[in-house]
Every structure is written in structure tokens, then in C-alpha cells.
């Protein structure tokens, strides 16, 4: 496979191998800050097909879904040192043995899931620069519906108000906004932000949703950004318009 030379004037292509759509969408939204374009794969076979057809500049792969097979197949595809695809690995197993094994298999960097959007972006930007000797332009502010999100300053603009977020609030907002229109259950939010092994009080998700709503000036009775589906979870509302009055 002949990977094309990196062109700073065009979006860099990133292959995202992740079978959890909720997290894959967070990666896709976050990389909008770096002028990247992404293509998704849910298995190593789908990822290999994209390697051949799309020639990505970089890959973000979930090592827990046959990441070792992907690395072996990528090597067997004839990628020499000069043409080797730079890979950022993700794993839910954060022990040293797992990380060392991933590096032994050829990944360039590794992060544990859950991760913060700002750290993911920093790692991908750094990996791109190390590999190609050039930087991808950083776009600190992206627009999602009626919100402008500044990942650099952890700041959100809603109308004329500028709001500062904590790290957890920013991760929560990215999770919701990346999956706009999709119902996210409390368990999905818990797993994506704190991990499956995290033990917390039963209302931790609701509490952080409440805090984020307060900063967004989002009345739960008239959801402008975050809608509640009682007994099920939450849904991000990308746009908002006042309901028409009936006579």
C-alpha cells in the first residue's frame, strides 16, 4: 500500500476502528478541531479494507477489538518503515502489560478509555507532527447547533453568554453533542466518562447533567440543549426553536 504524502492544505485522513458508536462519534467530533476527516470501521477486516481504498494518514484503533490482528495485517500488507501507518491505540485495560504489548505490536501511542477529548486531540496532533514533520491547523472553536465550543479554554458560548466548564463537564458535553439526536442511557454515559469499573453514587450522571444544564441556562422543563427521557436517559438537542402558540 502506498500511503499518500501528507498535504497540510487538505484535511488529514484518520481511520477510526471502534465498535462502540457512542465513543467513535466523540472521536469524530473532537477531530473537527484539528481539520481531520474520519472514516469508521467496526472490525479489523473493515479497517484493512479502508487502508487499501482510502489511504489514511493516521489510525485511531480500539486494541480491545482485535487490535493485534489489525497491526499484524497492516504489517503483512507490505508497510515498510517509511510507509508505516502511525497508530494511536485505545484500550480499557490500562495495566502496564497491556500497554507494553501494544507498543511491541507496533502502535505509536496508547490511551486508556475513558479519555478526555482534549487529551485525544493533543495526542493525535502530536502524532501527526512527529510522523509528517508538519502540523495540522488547530481550530479551537467548533459550532454544534447553537453552541460554540472552545476546547482550548474549556469555554462554551451559548447566545451572548460565555460559560467555563470543568474537565468532566466538557467531556460530558462532547459526549452528548457528538451523539446529537441519539438517546444516551445513564449506563452509557457512565461507561463513556468514568469506565465500566467505576463505582459511584447512583445519581452521579444526573448530578453532572444538572450542573451542565445550569451553566447552559437550560431549563429542564423547556429543554434547549439537553432533553430528558424519564426512566431512559438524555438526548442532546442540537437546535432549538420556541414552540408556536396555538389559539
Image (spheres, rainbow, N blue to C red):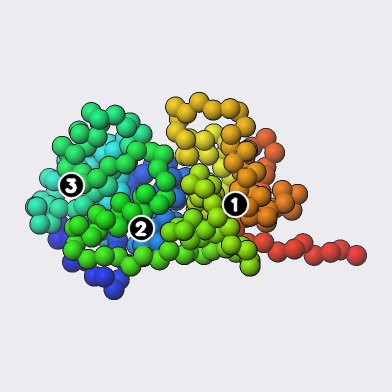
- Quadrant of the image occupied by residue 20: top left
* Label 1 or label 3, whichever comes before in sequence order: 3
- Residue at the image point whose x is 24% and y is 34% from the top: 99
Q: Nearer the viewer, residue 209 or 14?
A: 209
Q: Position of residue 232 (x, y in %)?
A: 64, 37
Q: Could you say where residue 2 lies in the image, as x and y percent from the top left?
A: 14, 61
The C terminus: image quadrant: bottom right
Q: Earlier in the sequence, mark 2 or mark 3?
A: 2
**Residue at the location (80% across, 65% down)?**
244
Q: Write down the residue under mark 2.
A: 38
Compared across the picture, whether 242 is left or right of 13 comes to right
Q: Secondary structure at mark 1?
A: strand
Graded by Cα atoms within 10 Å as few (under 14), some (14 to 19) or many (20 or more), the crowding at tag 1 reads many
Kindly identify which residue carries mark 3: 74
Q: Disc 1 or 2, which lies upstream in sequence?
A: 2
Left or right: where does residue 243 sit relative to residue 226?
A: right
Q: Residues within 10 Å of mark 3 (few under 14, many from 20)?
A: many
Q: Residue furthest bottom?
A: 9
Mark 1 highlights which residue?
Answer: 236
Q: CA distance from mark 2 to mark 3?
A: 18 Å
Furthest residue in direction right, as rendered: 247
> Which of the 4 quarters of the picture holds residue 205?
top right
Residue 203's place in the image compared with 165, above or below, is above
Asked if residue 145 can be seen in this view, the reply is no
Residue 160 image offset from top left, x and y in percent: 63, 67
Q: Secondary structure under badge 3? A: helix
Amino acid at each position: 500500500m502506498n500511503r499518500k504524502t501528507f498535504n497540510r492544505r487538505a484535511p488529514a485522513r484518520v481511520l477510526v476502528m471502534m465498535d462502540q458508536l457512542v465513543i467513535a462519534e466523540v472521536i469524530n467530533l473532537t477531530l473537527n478541531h484539528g481539520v481531520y476527516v474520519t472514516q469508521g470501521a467496526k472490525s479489523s477486516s473493515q479497517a484493512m479494507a479502508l487502508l487499501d481504498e482510502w489511504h489514511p494518514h493516521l489510525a485511531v484503533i480500539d486494541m480491545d477489538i482485535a487490535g493485534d490482528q489489525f497491526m499484524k495485517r497492516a504489517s503483512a500488507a507490505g508497510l515498510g518503515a517509511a510507509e508505516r501507518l502511525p497508530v494511536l491505540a485505545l484500550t480499557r485495560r490500562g495495566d502496564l502489560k497491556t500497554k507494553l504489548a501494544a507498543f511491541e505490536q507496533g502502535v505509536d501511542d496508547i490511551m486508556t478509555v475513558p479519555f478526555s477529548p482534549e487529551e485525544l486531540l493533543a495526542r493525535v496532533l502530536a502524532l501527526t507532527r512527529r510522523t509528517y514533520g508538519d502540523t495540522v491547523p488547530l481550530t479551537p472553536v467548533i459550532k454544534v447547533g447553537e453552541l460554540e465550543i472552545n476546547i482550548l479554554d474549556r469555554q462554551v458560548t451559548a447566545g451572548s453568554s460565555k460559560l467555563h466548564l470543568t474537565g468532566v463537564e466538557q467531556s460530558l458535553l462532547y459526549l452528548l453533542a457528538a451523539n446529537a439526536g441519539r438517546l444516551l442511557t445513564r449506563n452509557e454515559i457512565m461507561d463513556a466518562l468514568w469506565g465500566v469499573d467505576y463505582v459511584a453514587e447512583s445519581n452521579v450522571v444526573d448530578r453532572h447533567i444538572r450542573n451542565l444544564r445550569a451553566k447552559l441556562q437550560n431549563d429542564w422543563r423547556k429543554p434547549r440543549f439537553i432533553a430528558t427521557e424519564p426512566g431512559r436517559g438524555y438526548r442532546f438537542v442540537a437546535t432549538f426553536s420556541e414552540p408556536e402558540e396555538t389559539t
